[in-house]
Each structure stands twice: as structure tokens, then as C-alpha cells.
Image (spheres, grey):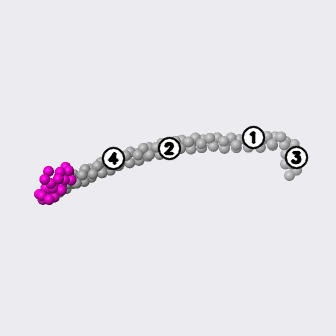
Amino acid sequence: MIKVKDFFVKYWKLVAGTMTGIFIFILGIFATSKNSSKEKVSASDGEAKAKAAQKEANDNKLLFEKWIADDKNLREAKEVKQEKIKEEKEKREKELGNDPDKLDTMLEDKFGLKKGE
């Protein structure tokens, strides 16, 4: 035990230098692996951003196509309803045209004509 103590006392600069060198070497290994980890993370982060952008573009395209289809369907339904309303109106005008009292009322409302004018 005394020999080990005498070695450390006699060569303390050598021991301290060796320990410092090992410590710096270990720090270098961690620093290098940290940089490569950052590169890996930024590479995978870039890929993830690209995938997210592509997914968003696809989702937007699908939503736009759905919106166009829904708009077309709504316009067609509106045209059908307008056509039914127009047919019903014409049918009611024909029915009213057959009844003289109702015809007088219709002409008065539509053209402002009064009976006997």
C-alpha cells in the first residue's frame, strides 16, 4: 500500500495528466455522438415535416373535392326545388284561371286591374 502511495506522490503530475486526458477523451466521445444525434434528429425531423406537408396537401385536396361535390349536389337540389315551385305556381294559376272570382282577384293582384275596368 505504501508503494502505491509513494508512486502517486512521486508521479502526481503524470497521474493528473492521464486522468485529465481520459476525461477530455470521454467528453469528446459524448460531444461527437451528440452532434450525430442532432443530425439524425434534424434529418428525421425534415422527413416528418415533409410527410406532414404532403398529408396536409392531400387532406386539403380531398376536402376541396368534397366541397365541390357537395356544392354541385346542393345546386342541383335547389334547381329541382325551384322547378317544382314553378310547376306548382303554374298549376295553381291555371286552377285560379278557371274560377271567375279567383281570376278577378288574381288579375287585381298581378296587374292592378279592378273588375269592370
**Disc 1 element:** helix
Q: In terms of image quadrants, where is residue 98?
A: bottom left
Using the image, tell me which numbered label, if any, was put on residue 6.
3
Q: Which is the main secondary structure of the residues drawn in magenta? A: helix
Using the image, tell me which numbered label, if any, was put on residue 34.
none
Q: Residues within 10 Å of mark 1 (few under 14, many from 20)?
A: few
| Spatial separation of the CA atoms under disc 3 and disc 4 | 90 Å
| Spatial separation of the CA atoms under disc 1 and disc 2 | 42 Å
Instruction: Between label 4 and label 1, give the one nearer the viewer.
Output: 4
**Disc 4 element:** helix
Q: Earlier in the sequence, mark 3 or mark 4?
A: 3
Q: Earlier in the sequence, mark 2 or mark 4?
A: 2
Q: Write the residue at 80% across / 42% down.
A: 16
Q: Residue placed farthest to the front in the image?
A: 116
Taking the image as shown, residue 48 lies to the left or right of residue 14, namely left
Tag 1–tag 2 contact (CB < 8 Å): no
Is 22 colored magenta in this rendering? Answer: no
Find residue 14 and report its horizontal and vertical position in percent.
81, 40
Using the image, tell me which numbered label, if any, was put on residue 68.
4
